[in-house]
Image: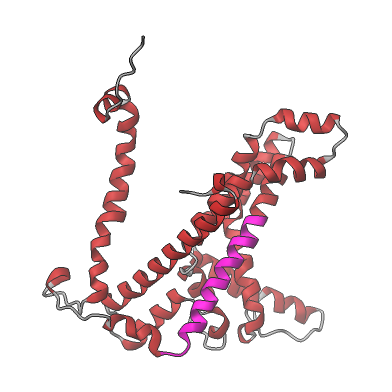
């Protein structure tokens, strides 16, 4: 009769020393850059000053949170942040899936690599340059669009005074920047699909659209679910660089473009305090709301399809 040896941590470490050694850099990265900085959360509840330091500064209770709720516009800011992130997730993921399917169907290797590389380049473009691109497109006097409109004797449009069009512009630039990056993840999932499924569909008379609908898209559901959960944890975090570089302090557009990050930045600049505690309080509030949203979304997804949940 064979007796199974009890598996212990020491035996696993001895057996898989190299694999555990490969985990050390990743563990150190998260410890140094994620877990140790969490001690700074106490700044949200302190009246911080440089002389006393983080732990020596006096406690201030919930004082640092008050500036978020004093202004009546904070509810609108939260609404903008959530709605923009939902639009970014939905439209962005749909565009990435469609583009990944398009890339996977390209037969020419050189053309396929060129398309994939070119689509990945916007990810490395600074948001400062994105803001410059947008300004050169939409500037009233010298913007490309208005120059074209003038050339055909059409009245130029003042884009920077029309709030209704900027949600579409912001979603477009966000989708454009993340298209290639996200498509790589979906493309890897597509390449892992058993090719025999497509051959069977072809033999049964299925065309490209049918094989995509009944084979490719269902196979991408787990990847879509994981990416959805990872993104929904940041649903209360606005992309500060995108919004600030494209909108700046344009008061005419703030009602429809102001998000939590830009609101906090402008509030601290206006007060000329640059209070570390107030900034930490805003970040803590975003993290708590995001964590609760993530737990709830994972719970709902687990009820719908247990295999797609994270835990």
Q: Position of residue 191 (x, y in %)?
A: 64, 35
Q: Inspect the magenta stretch and tell me whether residue 245 lies in it.
A: no
Q: Residue at x 29, y 23 (%)?
A: 6
Question: Where residue 167 sits in the image (x, y, percent)?
Answer: 62, 75
Residue nearest the observer in this picture, 140 or 42:
42
In percent of width and height, residue 228 lies at: 55, 55
Q: Can residue 188 be seen in this snapshot? A: yes
- Secondary structure mainly formed by the magenta segment: helix
Q: In percent of the image, x 30 and y 54: which residue is there?
A: 33
Q: Is residue 248 above or below residue 123?
A: below
User: In the image, which residues are magenta?
Assistant: 71-94
> For residue 78: magenta?
yes
Instruction: Mark yes or no: residue 117 visible.
Output: no
Reply above or below: 114 against 177.
Answer: above
Observer-nearest residue: 181 or 26? 26
Q: Is residue 29 left or right of residue 136?
A: left
**Which of the 4 quarters of the picture holds residue 300?**
bottom right
Residue 2 picture location, percent across and down:
36, 11
Q: Residue at x 58, y 66 (%)?
A: 86
In depth, the one of 299 and 208 nearer the eye is 299
**Quadrant (top left/top right/bottom left/bottom right) for the N terminus:** top left
Which one is in front, 177 or 262? 262
Q: In which image quadrant can residue 56 be found?
A: bottom left
**Looking at the image, which residue sits at the far front?**
1
In percent of the image, x 81 and y 83: which residue is there? 153
Counting labels gives 0
Identify the colour scheme used.
secondary structure
Residue furthest to the top: 1
């Amino acid at each position: 009769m064979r007796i199974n040896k009890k598996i212990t941590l020491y035996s696993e470490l001895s057996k898989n020393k190299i694999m555990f050694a490969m985990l050390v850099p990743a563990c150190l990265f998260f410890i140094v850059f994620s877990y140790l900085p969490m001690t700074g959360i106490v700044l949200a509840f302190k009246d911080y000053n440089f002389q006393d330091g983080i732990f020596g500064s006096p406690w201030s209770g919930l004082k640092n949170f008050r500036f978020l709720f004093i202004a009546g516009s904070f509810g609108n800011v939260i609404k903008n942040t959530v709605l923009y992130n939902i639009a970014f997730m939905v439209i962005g993921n749909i565009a990435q899936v469609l583009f990944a399917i398009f890339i996977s169907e390209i037969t020419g290797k050189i053309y396929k690599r060129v398309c994939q590389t070119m689509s990945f380049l916007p990810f490395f473009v600074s948001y400062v340059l994105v803001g410059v691109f947008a300004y050169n497109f939409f500037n009233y006097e010298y913007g490309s669009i208005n120059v074209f409109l003038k050339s055909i004797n059409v009245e130029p449009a003042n884009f920077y005074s029309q709030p209704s069009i900027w949600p579409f512009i912001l979603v477009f630039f966000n989708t454009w920047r993340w298209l290639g990056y996200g498509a790589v993840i979906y493309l890897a999932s597509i390449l892992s699909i058993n090719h025999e499924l497509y051959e069977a569909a072809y033999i049964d008379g299925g065309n490209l659209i049918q094989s995509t609908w009944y084979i490719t898209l269902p196979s991408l559901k787990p990847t879509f679910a994981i990416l959805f959960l990872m993104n929904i944890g940041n649903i209360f975090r606005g992309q500060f660089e995108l919004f600030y570089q494209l909108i700046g302090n344009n008061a005419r557009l703030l009602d429809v473009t102001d998000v939590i990050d830009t609101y906090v930045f402008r509030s601290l600049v206006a007060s000329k305090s640059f209070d570390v505690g107030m900034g930490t309080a805003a970040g803590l509030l975003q993290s708590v709301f995001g964590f609760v949203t993530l737990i709830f979304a994972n719970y709902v997804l687990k009820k719908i399809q247990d295999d797609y949940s994270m835990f």
